[in-house]
Image (cartoon, helix red, strand yellow):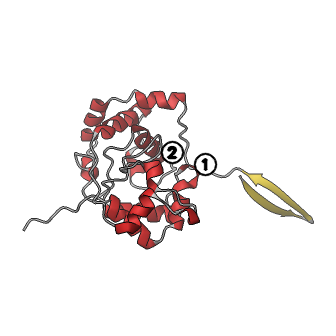
Amino acid sequence: MKLLTIIFGSFLIITTVQADVSSLVAFDKDTRAIIKAGDALQGKEKAASMKCNKCHAENGQGDDDVSVAGHPATYIYKQLKDFQDGKRDGVMRKKVKQLTNQDMADFSAWYATLPFAKGTEGGGQLAIDLVYKGDPKRMLKPCSTCHGQNGEGGKYDSAAITGQNKEAFIEMMEAFKENDRTNDIYSRMRLIAKVLTEKEIQALAEYYGAPEEEEEE
């Protein structure tokens, strides 16, 4: 809720307006049933048909883009729905415009089966402390609390963040920090990103980021 102050003549009126929700996805019984009904083989065929590998590669890890491999199916489904509902912006909005709930469930089932890349676990002690200890003074919970001990993701809307392209990871965190991405439920990632410094975000990118491929001579 937000307070709205209106001056009408000589009267001061204070009322409330409903804040825009970050996502229309609720993990209720019906939604969970849709996701559970996802067919991974159908998802694989649909991904090939729609040429998803152009950005995300055949293994889902995305050479120069966001890795979608290994995320919980619930997380992938939510992101696709958020793009379709306009709760998340980007090129994917056009891609998913005509997808059905079954299509999105199939995509989610397929990409959830793919292994994610291992992070390089760089970033030094700074990254390790953020991942496993957080910072109580700033009310920062450890990253592992929601995203798993190995960055493998958690329940429902917690992404797998290990093995991400480093630059994509930094861009994602900056998007949350600047309110350019607002589909995180209860503003959780936005609140965290705003507290983190650029140095800390870089350290986390080094920790969770996928190894960089060596150029062939």
Q: Secondary structure at mark 2?
A: helix
Q: Residues within 10 Å of mark 2 (few under 14, many from 20)?
A: some
Q: Position of residue 78 (x, y in %)?
A: 46, 42
Looking at numbered disc 1 in the image, what kind of residue is underneath it?
Val
Image location (x, y in percent) of residue 164: 32, 56
Q: CA distance from mark 2 to mark 1?
A: 11 Å
Tag count: 2
How would you rate the neighbour count of disc 1 (Cα within 10 Å): few for under 14, some for 14-19, many for 20 or more?
Answer: some
- The amino acid on which the numbered mark 2 sits, given as a three-letter code, is Asp
The disc placed on residue 21 is 1
Give the position of the C terminus as an image quadrant. bottom left
In front: label 2 or label 1 = 1
Q: Percent from the top left, x then y, of residue 80?
A: 43, 44
Q: Nearer the viewer, residue 208 or 125?
A: 125
Q: Secondary structure at mark 1?
A: loop
The relative height of residue 211 versus residue 149 in the rendered view (above or below) is below
Of the two numbered discs 2 and 1 on the same chain, state the one appearing first in sequence. Answer: 1
Q: Residue furthest right?
A: 10
- Relative placement, left or right, of 9 versus 205 is right
Q: Is residue 4 left or right of residue 157?
A: right
Residue shown at 53%/40% (left/top)?
Answer: 25
Q: Is residue 178 visible?
A: no
Q: Which mark is residue 85?
A: 2
Residue 4 seen anywhere in this rendered image of the structure: yes
Label pair 2/1, CB-CB below 8 angstroms: no
